[in-house]
Image (tube, helix red, strand yellow):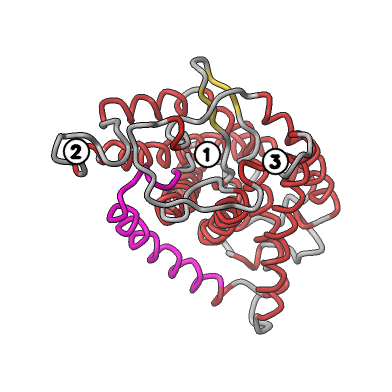
Amino acid sequence: MHIPDNYLSPSTCAVMTAAAIPAWVHSVKKLKAELPKEKMVLLGVGAAFSFLGMMFNVPMPGGTTGHAVGGTLIALLLGPEAACIAVTIALLVQALLFGDGGILAFGANCFNMSFILPFVGYYSYKLFCKLFKADELGASKGKKILSAGLGSYLGINAAALMAAIEFGIQPMLFSDAAGQPLYCPYGLSVSIPAMMIGHLTIFGLAEVIFTVAIYSFLAANSSDSFYGEKGFSSIEASHQGFGSRKAGILLGVLMLATPLGLLAAGTAWGEWGIDEMPTMTESFSWNALMPDYTLGGLPEWVAYILSAVIGVAIVIILFRIIGASMKSKTNYD
């Protein structure tokens, strides 16, 4: 779902970035007003889970691949605004350092994966909790876990639909004098089925499994530390809850397991390189330090693990720095 550069027109990228700005502004204001600096590190942990989830490519018959994003998972743990910022930072690190997702298309990718996905996923989860009466006293955790799975499924499919529409309108709006598409050559009749078939089946299931597995693990170890009716005050401090050693161990296991994502041959639909789409013209190119999670002559699986370690370290350090620069809040209980 990472849209590369040159698949969307510059004007489309500008519009999508403008659409993402209100979500960023709202989310930052919410976090600055309510999130204690002691809990800022939890956003880094959430961003790390999202970063790693996007490295586990899942194959689909026909030679394409996809992956989980984890936006709904972070929204369940920290709230949708926190998820918006956490996934945005994960996407930024991926684009700048690893060339995964375009620089010009960054706003579009964020609109889809850091705004649409977590907000749709979170509020769908809340709706299912009401339908299943999962918030009632004595309700089983299974109902909340089911709601989490359904919410994550709707969230990733809503994001995939947005990406499909962004791809599909390109040939309708941008072509040369001969009628040749200048950017993505596939119209809505191709882009929507191509994106949605995979996400309604295998990739949506991957998002559900990723969300439910980690949510269940963290719920079993820190049942009272999730974002809830009391907002951020219901989340335990960074040295407790899902910021605990067990969460760190889980991150370590996921980092070591990332080479499993290399087993999925092929490329995600819409994420091809210019060399795979000769009809398109390359108008912008970013030279990432570790393109496609590779590094010099290192074996692919070693470079993949190293990329995971570097990416996780960067996002966690960034949020620690942000937290250190924040003023302490004393009015949360």
- Around disc 3, counting alpha carbons within 10 Å, would you say few (fewer than 14), some (14 to 19), or many (20 or more)? some
Q: Residue 117, how many percent across, how many down?
A: 47, 46
Residue 67 higher or lower than 71, as above or below: above
Give me the residue at 70% from left, 56% from top: 45
Residue holding disc 2:
172
Find residue 152 and name its label. Answer: 1
Find residue 214 and name its label. Answer: 3
The amino acid pointed to by label 3 is Ile
Q: Residue 254: in sight, yes or no?
A: no
Mark 1 against mark 2, which lies toward the viewer? 2
Residue 39 higher or lower than 304, as above or below: below
Q: Residue 170, how many percent across, how many down?
A: 26, 41
Q: CA distance from mark 1 to mark 3?
A: 12 Å
- Around disc 2, counting alpha carbons within 10 Å, would you say few (fewer than 14), some (14 to 19), or many (20 or more)? some
Q: Secondary structure at mark 1?
A: helix
Q: Secondary structure at mark 2?
A: helix
Q: Which residues are magenta?
A: 4-31
